[in-house]
Amino acid sequence: MAKEAIDLNIIIRTPRPEDIEAVVAISREGYPERSEDPKHWQDPDPRRYFVAEEDGEVVGYGCLRPDLPRQPEVPQYRLHLGVRPDRRGRSIGGRLYDHLYEALVSLRAENVWTRVRHTEFDTLAFLERRGFMDRQRQIYLTLEVAASVPQASPPQGIVITTLKDELAAHPDCYRAIHDLQNLCFADIPTANPTPLPSFDDFQKSMQDPALLFDGYFLAKAGERFVGLSYLAREGGGAPTTLSQRLTGTHPDFRRRGIAMALKACTLRYAREHGCRRIITRTNALNTGMLAVNRAMGFAHWYTDIQLHRPIGH
């Protein structure tokens, strides 16, 4: 790979604890809703984390985080890269990328993935020049919660309950919910499939303080769980914005309106709890769920392009 001209005022180095605040601030410039987590920078692996410094200030960052492909033996990483807006166009991103690429080779990585918004034309061009290819797209949608919400009742024989109520009546219900969740995950189209969560992983995920157990809706046919749709707080604290995470239906019960009925429950929950906005995302290939979301009033927010590059040794 050809090296770009070097600005001697820019130093690429491994990060120090005092860099965390600047790194988080730079990441928020590009994706304020999913900025860098400070905990990742408290004890960073010097082989995989770098910052760009100019005149004593951190003006860019780059890091690699292990990814989890369906084949765990394949070394694969996620690339995160950011440069302060007032320092762009000076090859800082290119120099950070060169350090990250050398790290990928030394780590014997076989693949690297990254993502960028569809409106970031310069970043897309930057990545494409370095061999990245558009592999899949996630559609982010948003809904402003109105005084009234679309009505959708479950079909005959289906009852909708909440995780809070199910745990009170059946403390051992996690196993069945985990099984349903994995059936739903397995059918989500993706160019980069990940292993289905083990039951232990599922139990750990249920300890997430952002989850709302009274906003975790489950559809039942008799005693069998056949659908789910759940909400989580976005950003912590008293939520004015909620994140709608997985919505799915058991393969044997699809195309009966269950997903619509579950979605309607989450909208009513948001309205009743004073929330103003719900965000969600759907793979661009998942046309069925896109149709459900749009029918419930969700509108396009932005598209996340996920790019991939194989690494040669």
Image: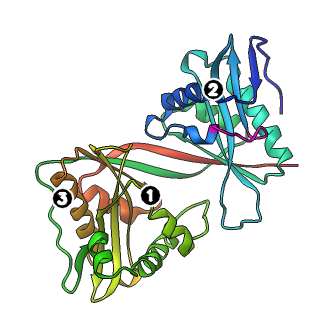
Residue 85 vs residue 80: left or right? Answer: left
Alpha carbon separation for disc pair 3 and 2: 43 Å
Q: Position of residue 299 (x, y in %)?
A: 30, 47
Magenta stretch, residue numbers: 41-48
- Farthest residue in the right direction? 313
- The image quarter containing residue 222 is bottom left
Residue 22 seen in this snapshot: yes
Q: Position of residue 111 (x, y in %)?
A: 74, 52
Q: Is the magenta stretch mostly helix, strand or loop?
A: loop
Q: How many marks?
A: 3
Answer with mark 2 or mark 1, whichever residue precedes in sequence: 2
Can you identify the residue that label 1 sits on? 208
Answer with mark 3 or mark 2, whichever residue precedes in sequence: 2
- How packed mark 2 is, by other alpha carbons closer than 10 Å (few <14, some 14-19, many 20 or more), is some
Alpha carbon separation for disc pair 2 and 1: 27 Å
Residue 213 vs residue 207: left or right? Answer: left
Instruction: Give the amino acid at mark 1.
Output: Asp
- The image quarter containing residue 223 is bottom left
Q: Residue sitting at 27 percent across and 74 percent down?
A: 258
Can you identify the residue that label 2 sits on? 19
Badge 2 vs badge 1, beta-carbon distance below 8 Å: no
Instruction: Give the amino acid at mark 2.
Output: Asp
Answer with mark 1 or mark 3, whichever residue precedes in sequence: 1
- How packed mark 1 is, by other alpha carbons closer than 10 Å (few <14, some 14-19, many 20 or more), is few
Instruction: Give the amino acid at mark 3.
Output: Arg
Residue 295 vs residue 182: left or right? Answer: left
Can you identify the residue that label 3 sits on? 268
Q: Where is residue 237 in the image (x, y as percent from the top left)?
A: 33, 43
Report the mark closest to the observer, 1 or 3: 1
Mark 3: which secondary structure? helix
